[in-house]
Each structure stands twice: as structure tokens, then as C-alpha cells.
Amino acid sequence: MSVQYYEGVGRRKESTARVRVMAGSGSFIVNEKSIEDYFTRMGDTEAIYAVLDAFDPTARAKFDVTVKVMGGGVTGQTDSVLLGLARALVKMDSDAISRLRRSGFLTRDPRIKERKKPGLKRARKAPTYTKR
């Protein structure tokens, strides 16, 4: 017996999240843990749940979400899950694209780490200048 699910991939900085949404009872699992246990920083779970609320105010109780997220830090992982969830919901219901786009959930943040330049310590930090 196969379960029908919708998958979306989200990326941000160095992080990649594969999000699967299926009909269910409202569980949200990230890397084999509950979302509250994985994203402990204040505001991260609320930001992710905001996508479900923009899609449908009753969506939290109607869908099961499983996420496999790799790479990056906490902020990148949070935003990649957010984008992947929005993309999966659009695959589920294409009418929701305008609501999610208006809320800014379908826009990928293109900012990435700037490369290190020769002669500098980091991308822009120069060694301390000494006159003598």
C-alpha cells in the first residue's frame, strides 16, 4: 500500500530540505524528531507553520509533514524547510500559488556566502594596515 504524498525541495544558503506533505493527523517530523525538538529557537516553528496557515487555516490538523534537511545552519535550514513546504503545497493545490506568492513564501532567497579573495582574510576583511 503506497501513501500519496506531495514533495517539494527548498534551498537557502548551504541548506537543502526535502519536504513531503500527505493527508493525516497533523504530525510534523524533521529528521526523525518533532518540529519543536528540532527547531528550538524562538520563532522558527511559527514561521514554518505560517506557510500552512496561509495555505489553509485548518491545514495544521489535516496534513502530516515529514522533512529531511541537510547542511547549513539553523537559519538556512528553517528557510529551506519553509520554501520546500510552500512548493509541496503548490503541487498539492495549484490554486494556492497566488496566496503563497503574495505572502512571500515561494521566493527563494538568492543570497549565498561570498568567496574569499586573495590577500584578504575573508571575503572583504583585510589584514591590519601598519604604517611602520
Image (cartoon, rainbow, N blue to C red):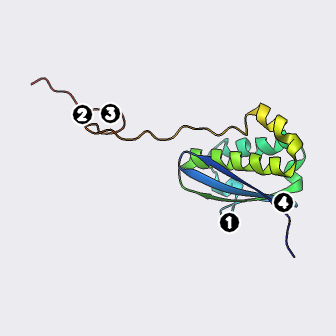
Which of discs 1 and 3 lies nearer the camera? The answer is: 3
Cβ–Cβ under 8 Å for marks 4 and 1: no
- The local crowd at label 2, few if under 14, some if 14 to 19, many if 20 or more residues have their Cα within 10 Å, is few
The image quarter in which residue 106 lies? top right
Distance between the alpha carbons at the discs numbered 3 and 4: 47 Å
Which of discs 2 and 1 lies nearer the camera? The answer is: 2
Residue to which mark 1 is pinned? 32
Residue 27: x and y in percent read: 80, 59
Distance between the alpha carbons at the discs numbered 4 and 2: 53 Å
The numbered disc on residue 22 is 4
Distance between the alpha carbons at the discs numbered 2 and 1: 44 Å
The numbered disc on residue 125 is 3
Residue 16: x and y in percent read: 60, 53
Residue farthest toward the left in the current orientation of the protein: 132
What's the residue at 65%, 54% (across, down)?
A: 17
Amino acid type of the residue that numbered disc 1 sits on in the rendered structure: Glu
Distance between the alpha carbons at the discs numbered 1 and 3: 40 Å
What's the residue at 89%, 54% (across, down)?
A: 62
